[in-house]
């Protein structure tokens, strides 16, 4: 018996209804399971961050962006194209990273009112005295010492050395002779300027380096061919400048700047010793008077100028106060954890490398493991007992409050210089540089230390109210860049003691080829006046950028593998991956460089912010994938430069 057609239709309808019901039920169960899973695994995960800090950062980034620019054509302009248009000129310090740092600086200077500040240590007390005396002092008598009444130019030069009358950089000096331990001098040259050429030939035009004993012998035999300056008693100078100097220590070398001392000798020959004293007085006068705030400044302006004086004299002291009062302990802890993470991913990167011999890989990993943290607080300030003792010398003859302003300035300058000279005599490395409330990050190769100013330890760099990935796109990138200097275009060839390391010709050629690729890429970047960047000049910084970016990219990918990440609000139309690259570019947003600023950048070893951003991103597969850039667009060229 055949089934009636209407029953067949009904069966089909029932089947469709049941199938639909089952599908709906399955979908409901899947959604329910997913929601429970999210609740359990992601703490009721919200895809967009809703904290006040997230809205603040999202708003700021949106303000600087130019959405009309295709990120695959010019990512810097896409991220920063409205920087000059939308940032208040009175709050624009040139680069967004500086703008952020100056917010913390303003808050700190409001907190640290030296007129009411309650000091806890000797350096804090003397810093407060210096600030108050600076505010009160409108004019000074510069020559508060009797050395100028004498014609002993060795004593005059020593006085100038003790108050740092010279542009010094690791004791490189442009007005007088200085002493280096032999190995310190070589280390300075290796770190500072590369060893592509032998330093003796490379520096002939600027420096002569000879052992002190040889100098003394020449002086006794009236042979002036090596040290032709009869106005300087080198033995007296050495013994007073460096108490640890020994005549029998043949490892000391004398370094002097030929042009400057030759000029002084010519004045002595033509006009006599008194004339050279007048020349040196001018240097001395300019140095000390630079610490006197002019009468035209008053009120808050004067207080701010005097704060800068204190900042120059007491960088470590202010760093300590800043960290104690403004930096949560968990932020400092997290910063040091990031350094460990950076070293770990560097070692992973080296393990994956397929063009270096194993011995070289082991050497690079060993060097990475040696890198220590000098983040936030200068190393020397971790032993306050020694610091207290050092500052007690300021008040040997009379208390700081009883000294004139200029006496105190000169005594502080002497103390800082003497401490530097003593460290050189003891063959110690100096590991702290820059001002604590300024953009300052360094890598000290001799002591294997990565240093970052404490102002990097707060919003928008380390802040637990921001998405987890923010720290990798900001703080960690700057830190990884500094770590990258241990392995950059120059340091790659050196071992942990900065001696040239034997590398196979094949490996050396491969590394050179990779560095040359970066040089060629950066050579194509064009300044606003139509001239091109010099990739050879900036190669050390560019390779450090390349290494740093690779390290934070690895950290970011690990973070994405661990758990879902929140997006910033306001710019939430972009994915987490896209926001990561936008955040990295954001710090380098800057106003267009013209005139003097442009001239400075042309001579800088750092690439312009625009070149740094586009140079890094155009070499990144991760970036081009995140933004879907087609092949052979400016930000996704076919040939990308790889380093390690």
Image (spheres, grey):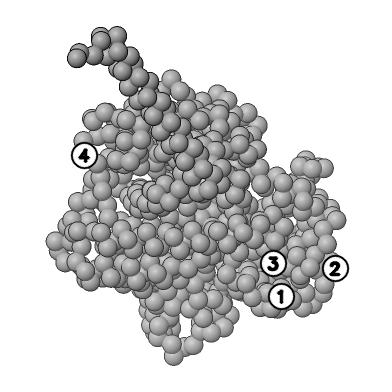
Instruction: Label 3: state its secondary structure.
Output: helix
Q: Quadrant of residue 327?
A: bottom right
Q: Is residue 445 above or below residue 581?
A: below
Res 546 visible: yes
Residue 412 numbered mark, or none: 3
What residue is shown with label 4? 639
Q: CA distance from mark 4 to mark 2?
A: 68 Å
Residue 48 numbered mark, or none: none
Q: Is residue 85 above or below residue 297?
A: above
Q: Residues within 10 Å of mark 3 (few under 14, many from 20)?
A: many
What residue is shown with label 2? 402
Q: Quadrant of the C terminus?
A: bottom left
Q: Viewer-proximal residue, 298 or 360? A: 360
Instruction: Label 1: state its secondary structure.
Output: helix
What residue is shown with label 1? 388
Q: Position of residue 263 (x, y in %)?
A: 47, 60
Q: Nearer the viewer, mark 3 or mark 4?
A: 4
């Amino acid at each position: 018996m055949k089934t009636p057609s209407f029953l067949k239709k009904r069966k089909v309808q029932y089947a469709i209804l049941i199938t639909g019901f089952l599908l709906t039920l399955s979908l409901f169960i899947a959604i329910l399971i997913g929601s429970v899973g999210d609740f359990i695994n992601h703490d009721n995960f919200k895809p967009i961050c809703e904290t006040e800090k997230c809205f603040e950062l999202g708003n700021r980034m949106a303000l600087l962006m130019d959405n009309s620019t295709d990120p695959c054509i010019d990512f810097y302009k896409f991220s920063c194209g409205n920087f000059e248009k939308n940032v208040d000129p009175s709050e624009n310090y040139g680069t967004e990273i500086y703008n952020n740092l100056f917010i913390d600086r303003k808050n700190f200077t409001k907190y640290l009112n030296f007129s009411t500040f309650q000091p806890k240590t000797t350096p804090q007390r003397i810093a407060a005295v210096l600030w108050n005396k600076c505010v009160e002092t409108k004019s000074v008598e510069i020559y508060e010492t009797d050395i100028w009444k004498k014609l002993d130019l060795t004593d005059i030069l020593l006085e100038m050395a003790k108050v740092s009358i010279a542009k010094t950089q690791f004791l490189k000096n442009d007005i007088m002779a200085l002493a280096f331990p032999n190995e310190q001098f070589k280390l300075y040259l290796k770190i500072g300027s590369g060893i592509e050429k032998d330093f003796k030939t490379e520096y002939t035009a600027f420096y002569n380096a000879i052992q002190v004993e040889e100098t003394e012998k020449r002086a006794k035999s009236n042979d002036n061919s090596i040290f032709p300056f009869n106005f300087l008693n080198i033995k007296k100078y050495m013994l007073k400048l460096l108490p640890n100097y020994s005549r029998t220590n043949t490892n000391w070398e004398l370094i002097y700047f030929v042009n400057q001392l030759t000029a002084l000798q010519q004045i002595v020959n033509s006009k006599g010793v008194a004339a050279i004293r007048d020349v040196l007085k001018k240097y001395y006068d300019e140095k000390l008077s630079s610490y006197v705030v002019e009468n035209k400044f008053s009120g808050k302006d004067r207080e701010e100028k005097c704060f800068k004086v204190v900042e120059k004299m007491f960088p470590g002291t202010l760093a300590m106060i800043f960290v104690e009062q403004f930096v949560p302990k968990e932020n400092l802890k997290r910063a040091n954890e990031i350094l460990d993470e950076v070293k770990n991913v560097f070692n992973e990167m080296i393990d994956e490398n397929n063009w270096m011999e194993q011995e070289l890989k082991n050497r690079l990993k060993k060097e990475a493991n040696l890198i220590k943290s000098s983040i936030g607080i200068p190393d020397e300030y971790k032993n306050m007992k020694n610091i207290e003792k050092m500052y007690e010398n300021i008040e040997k003859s009379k208390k700081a409050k009883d000294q004139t302003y200029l006496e105190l300035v000169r005594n502080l300058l002497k103390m800082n210089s003497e401490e530097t000279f003593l460290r050189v005599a003891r063959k110690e490395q100096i590991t702290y540089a820059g001002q604590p409330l300024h953009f300052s990050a360094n890598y000290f190769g001799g002591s294997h230390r990565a240093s970052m100013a404490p102002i990097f330890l707060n919003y928008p760099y380390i802040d637990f109210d921001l998405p987890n990935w923010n720290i990798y796109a900001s703080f960690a990138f700057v830190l990884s860049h500094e770590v990258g200097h241990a392995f950059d275009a120059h340091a790659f060839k050196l071992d942990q003691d900065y001696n040239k390391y034997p590398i196979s010709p094949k490996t050396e050629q491969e590394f050179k080829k990779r560095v040359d690729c970066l040089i060629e890429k950066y050579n194509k970047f064009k300044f606003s006046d139509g001239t091109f960047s010099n990739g050879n000049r900036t190669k050390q910084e560019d390779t450090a950028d390349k290494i740093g970016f690779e390290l934070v990219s690895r950290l970011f990918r690990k973070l994405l593998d661990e758990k879902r990440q929140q997006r910033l609000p306001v710019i939430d139309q972009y994915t987490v991956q896209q926001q990561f690259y936008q955040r990295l570019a954001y710090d380098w947003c800057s106003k267009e460089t013209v005139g003097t600023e442009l001239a400075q950048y042309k001579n800088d070893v750092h690439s312009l912010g625009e070149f740094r951003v586009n140079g890094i991103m155009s070499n990144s597969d991760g970036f081009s994938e995140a933004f879907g850039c087609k092949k052979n667009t400016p930000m996704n060229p076919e040939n990308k430069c790889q380093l390690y």
